[in-house]
Amino acid sequence: MLHDVRPEQVAPRALVFVLLALLLSWLPLGLLLVTSGDPAAGPGSMGLWLLGGLGPGLAAILLSWRHEGRAGPRRILASLLRWRFGPRGWLLLAPLAVGLLGVAVAVWVGPARWEVAEPSYLLLVPVVLVGGVVFGGLEEIGWRGHLQPLLQVRLSGLAAALIVGVVWSVWHAPLFLLTGTTQATSSPVWFTVGGLALAVLFAWVWNISGGNLLLLVLLHGALNGWYTAAVQGLAPGALGAGFEVVTALVATALAVLLVARAGRNLGLATHRAAAGSSS
């Protein structure tokens, strides 16, 4: 298990994971870029898009199998089946609140205007949320399910989260070159600022939940899904600079407040206690 990793093993294992995750993701995304360049161009393009998003998770599964045998993938699967969230279930609605705030400010300061969707759009919200999990949430198997706890063997929760945030942001680089992606219309600077803040917030959720991977998968999916639902349902033209800046700053403010309150370890003691009781 990851909490059995020795401190001197952390850096090489983390480097191998990062390189493998980038390879498994950037190879299909690179093929997509030199072919259609648009994930929605057809089934083949969508398949490459999906495969690229699975890179971090596949890397985590392969490396856990290498180091732990069959017990590694089984451990990951067991964490994906932990449906009991207790009082932390409300966290899945937090991205909706931030998304609504971003839409409101984008309409207030920019060219976007309110265009409330037809009531039938509500039927698409579950589809959007499921899509957020499939095309984003499953990354968490690698980011928080593997890299964050691996780095925490040697580093504080905050230091580990910031490293994960940098890797996470760099991993998205090919998406800025593809047509129709959120990143295609985003500023790399503000995207990175928001990514670092989210990495801190997600690390805290991972630690205080005792490493509940399913909660992180759904939270990441909710982040993607609620943003899409809020923008497309209330102001389709809002997803731009104003929205991006506001949501990045709100996430950063929340991360700073969290560190001030929870400390640099971001609930790491809770995670270690949970890991110890399950070993």
Image (spheres, rainbow, N blue to C red):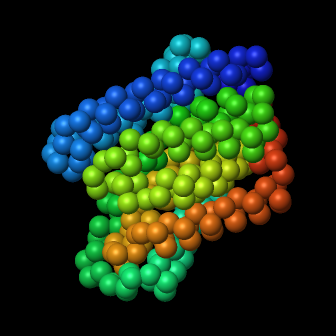
Give above or below for 160 relative to 188.
above
Give above or below for 133 relative to 116.
above
Q: On the rendered structure, is 11 left or right of 94?
A: right
Give above or below for 261 relative to 41.
below
Q: On the rendered structure, is 76 left or right of 131?
A: right
Q: On the rendered structure, is 86 left or right of 128?
A: right
Image coordinates for residue 95, horizontal then vertical, percent: 54, 65
Can see residue 218? Answer: no
Seen from the viewer's position, the closer of residues 121 and 40 is 40
Residue depicted at x 56% and y 20%: 16
Residue depicted at x 23% and y 36%: 34
- The picture quadrant where one finds residue 35 is top left
Quadrant location of the N terminus?
top right
Can see residue 156? Answer: yes
Image coordinates for residue 277, horizontal then vertical, percent: 76, 32
Quadrant location of the C terminus?
top right
Q: In the displayed image of the protein, which residue is found farthest to the left?
A: 42
Q: How many numbered marks are there? A: 0
- The picture quadrant where one finds residue 180 is bottom left
Seen from the viewer's position, the closer of residues 115 and 169 is 169
Seen from the viewer's position, the closer of residues 119 and 117 is 117
- The picture quadrant where one finds residue 245 is bottom right
Residue depicted at x 53% and y 13%: 66
Image coordinates for residue 159, horizontal then vertical, percent: 74, 40
Residue depicted at x 31% and y 33%: 30
